[in-house]
Amino acid sequence: MLRALAAGICLPLIFSGCGKPGDRAVLANVIFVRGNVVFDNGKERARHSQSATTATKLAAGDRLETLPDAAAALSLIPGIFIQIGGGTEIVIEELRVWKRGDAMVDAMRSRVAALRINRGVIRASLPNVGSGQCELNVQTDLGTLVAQRGALVSVRLTNERVRVACVDGEVHWRSAAGRGADEISEGYFQDYARNAVSSDNLKPEPSPVSDNAGAQNDVAAALEVAASFEEFILRVRNAPAPKSSHQ
């Protein structure tokens, strides 16, 4: 996996369009694939699924699906990584950067990624590197997770509930029922059951991860994913600069 990550992260940031000056839509890189992973283009009227590879680029509107026992890792935007587990379906909603000049992460004033998860599990890592705003929004039919730089989080969506486990940093959950935002701190998780979304019950409080075996498994998996991304970032930082063609 690390070899695939190291190859994928060196790919340049690809721009797919622009809005206001410095604000541009970008493409996500698929940097790791295991098993059967397919995607299709959201802009096409008749969607035709294709096998995803480390050469695949994904834009807003594209759908990515992993079959059982499969997995994929993506660099949505430099500094925003996700890993999707088996039996997961996501749709990319937005990938935008606002930057000055031609430099990469350090010149980025804003990095915003948004996606929708229809089922399955996502582990998201936003390393505390770079500058400016760095935000990931994970949308579900029950609400939206908001994570910023320094966060490591797991989101698992089933037919019964969505489980948000905060491994590092701090994340917020905005309920689709309009109850405001919940804060979920490091080491805590929260279950949002479908049958409780529209009820008038008191808002539940996050629970320690140590109280639930399922949450512990989600945290362990997220930590493993984060370790891979951290090692990968170190490899990129320590890689020798490319030689000039004039030398």
Image (spheres, grey):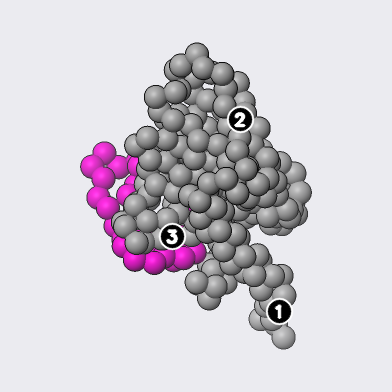
Frontmost residue, 139 versus 134: 139
**Tag 2: residue type?**
Glu
Q: Quick one: label 2, few (<14), some, or many (20+) residues within 10 Å?
A: few
Q: Quick one: label 1, few (<14), some, or many (20+) residues within 10 Å?
A: few
Q: Quadrant of residue 111?
A: top right
Q: Quadrant of residue 113?
A: top right
> Tag on residue 190?
none
Front position among marks 3 and 1: 3
**In terms of secondary structure, where does tag 3 sit?**
strand
Q: In the image, what residue occupies the spot 34% across and 61% down? A: 69
* Residue 98 appears anywhere in the view: no
Q: CA distance from mark 3 to mark 1?
A: 27 Å
Give the magenta part as a residue range: 26-54
- The picture places residue 242, in percent across and down from the top left corner, at 67, 78
- The picture places residue 240, in percent across and down from the top left corner, at 71, 79
Q: In the image, what residue occupies the spot 67% across and 50% down? A: 168
First reached walking from the N terminus: tag 3 or tag 1: 3
- The picture places residue 204, in percent across and down from the top left corner, at 57, 27
Report which residue position mark 3 lands on: 72
**Tag 3: residue type?**
Ala
Answer with left or right where residue 237 lies relative to residue 13. Answer: right
Q: Quadrant of the C terminus?
A: bottom right
First reached walking from the N terminus: tag 3 or tag 2: 3
Residue 87 lies in the magenta stretch: no
Q: CA distance from mark 1 to mark 2?
A: 48 Å
Frontmost residue, 18 versus 27: 27
Report which residue position mark 2 lands on: 205
Report which residue position mark 1 lands on: 240
Front position among marks 3 and 2: 2
Q: In the image, what residue occupies the spot 53% across and 46% down? A: 212
**In terms of secondary structure, where does tag 1 sit?**
loop
- The picture places residue 97, in percent across and down from the top left corner, at 63, 44
